[in-house]
Amino acid sequence: MARKLEGKIALITGGSSGIGLATAKDFAAEGAHVYITGRRQSELDRAVDEGGGQITAIQGDVSRMEDLDRLFHVIQTEQGWLDAVFANAGTGGFAPLGQITEEHFDKQFDLNVKGLLFTVQKALPLLRDGSSIVLNASIVSVKGNPAFSVYSATKAAVRSFARTWAVDLRERRIRVNAISPGVVPTPGYNTSLGMNEQQVDEFVQGSLASIPLGRAGTPEEIAKAVTFLVSPDSSYINGIELFVDGGLAQI
């Protein structure tokens, strides 16, 4: 059976762990050569080892323009084009209104909004007409969660980007869609949100009653949805927000 992404060149930011890594593996299994970015070299090395020769890792921080320029220079030199971008890199943090600091605000908007925007913009010269862009948003853009206002605002911006960029890129037939995961435990719960394993477990258990499917999701389930959005199977889907949340944001 033909693989969905055979011969395609893809970029995944934040691809060294969690949803990004699961998606990189799924893209590779479907025949793509995948470039991934991340800030921690040890995790990038491990991802390459697990990628079966189909993953190339480039260390960098997408909120730094010089790192993005270096990333795209490597892709231009080695491949010359891109067929898909999954703008996945992001961070989060808790702070209730009244305790939000400038540092808390800047860190999340620099990575989740500025970094994502310039990732896509700098990718445009390499993206072939008819290619696909997927932006990692979140159900928090439509749900009210305590102490999560800054992170939620960044993800609302990401959702807006999908709508406006779908129009901006219509002449090139480049599709732009957002994916919004629900409760999906990843290493980011520990590294970005600062939760220990007990706190993660308590959060997940406390969420189950609100999820119609009655369980948390997995990075692999999100990856399958991203693969669908960059593949020919979704050729008439553009500008949408695909919720992959077990129904949490739908009730």
Image: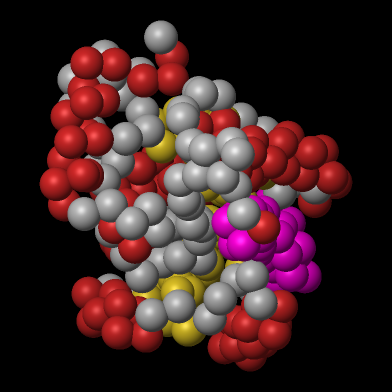
Specify whether residue 3 is in view.
no
Residue 204 lies left or right of residue 61; in this view the side is left
Front residue of 15/171: it is 15
Q: Nearer the viewer, residue 20 or 32?
A: 20
Q: Tell me the quarter of the image containing the C terminus.
A: top left
- Tell me the residue at 37%/33% (across/down): 182
Q: Is residue 169 visible?
A: yes
Q: Position of residue 193 (x, y in %)?
A: 38, 53
Residue 78 vs residue 107, the one in the foreground: 107
In the picture provided, is 236 more to the left or to the right than 180? right
As for residue 126 lying within the magenta part, the answer is: yes
Q: What residue lies at 71% left-to-right and 78% top-to-bottom?
A: 65
Q: Could you say which quadrant of the image residue 215 lies in?
A: top left
Q: Residue furthest top?
A: 251
The range drawn in magenta is 103-132
Q: Residue 240: x and y, percent?
A: 61, 30
Looking at the rendered structure, the number of numbered marks drawn on it comes to 0
Magenta stretch, overall SS: helix
- Residue 91: % across, % down: 49, 57
Left or right position of 166 against 150: right
